[in-house]
Amino acid sequence: PDRVDNLYFLYMFVLRALSKAKPTLQLLDYSTGDVSEDALTKAEVDRLLDARLVCTETFNETLMFQGSSNKAEILSQMRSKFFNISLLMDCLSCEKCRLWGKVETHGLATALKIVVEDVPMTGMQRSEIVALVQLLRQLSSSLSSVQRLLALHQALKERENEGSCEDSNGRSASDNTGKTLKQGS
């Protein structure tokens, strides 16, 4: 449950970053070298930025450091942790895991920079924008999976409560000794 709450928190945080970056992101030139790809990319970015969740305030960053006396020290600690995580990524033997881990860490660092550090958006690098959007895509996918698993879990619970551990022929599930199996055995 805590991990799911953390996913939702992170999702709202990244949505807030996109919301704050929206004016700048709408003005950027998304030049890929292919005119049709450029138009498609611009249309997709505009569609993302006009999404309801990006347009509503999902996260209030002013509450993040409320009651804390030293925002600069906390931000310095966060930067240090991101650097350490990035160094740990170098130790991964799977190249795909290392790549995606670094992209997502870069996306989170970008979101932090946008939401908390009040860095001007005009200086954003292309890699930061890509990492931020990729992180949002991954979080969205993860939360969709969580929703499917929760729905499946709820359906199994309801089925268990009804007492129907029966197969398609209406027989109770049992092992080869004839004893009825309980879930988790």
Image (cartoon, helix red, strand yellow):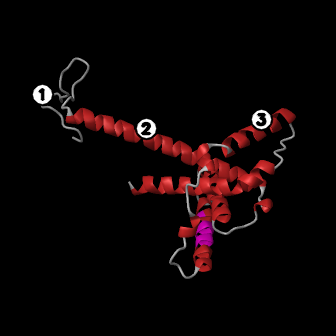
Q: Residues within 10 Å of mark 3 (few under 14, many from 20)?
A: few
What secondary structure is marked by label 3?
helix
Q: Quadrant of residue 165?
A: top left
Residue positioned most to the top: 169
Q: How many marks?
A: 3
Q: Which mark is residue 57?
A: none
What secondary structure is marked by label 1?
loop
Reply above or below: 141 against 172. below
Of labels 1 and 3, the one closer to you = 3
Q: Residue at x 57, y 57 (%)?
A: 13
What secondary structure is marked by label 2?
helix
Q: Report the side of 151 relative to 114 (left or right).
A: left
Residue 81 part of the magenta segment:
yes
* Image coords of residue 97 (percent x, y): 59, 50
Q: Which residue is mark 2?
A: 148
Residue 50 part of the magenta segment:
no
Chief SS of the magenta region? helix
Q: Quadrant of residue 45?
A: top right
Residue positioned most to the front: 56
Q: Give the magenta range.
A: 78-85
* Image coords of residue 47 (percent x, y): 69, 40
Q: Report the side of 110 relative to 53 (left or right).
A: right
Q: Quadrant of the N terminus?
A: bottom left
Reply above or below: 120 against 170. below
Q: Which residue is mark 1?
A: 178
Reply above or below: 31 against 169. below
Q: Report the side of 121 relative to 77 (left or right).
A: right
Q: CA distance from mark 3 to mark 2?
A: 30 Å
Q: Earlier in the sequence, mark 3 or mark 2?
A: 3
Q: Nearer the viewer, residue 62 or 68?
A: 62
Q: Which residue is mark 3?
A: 40
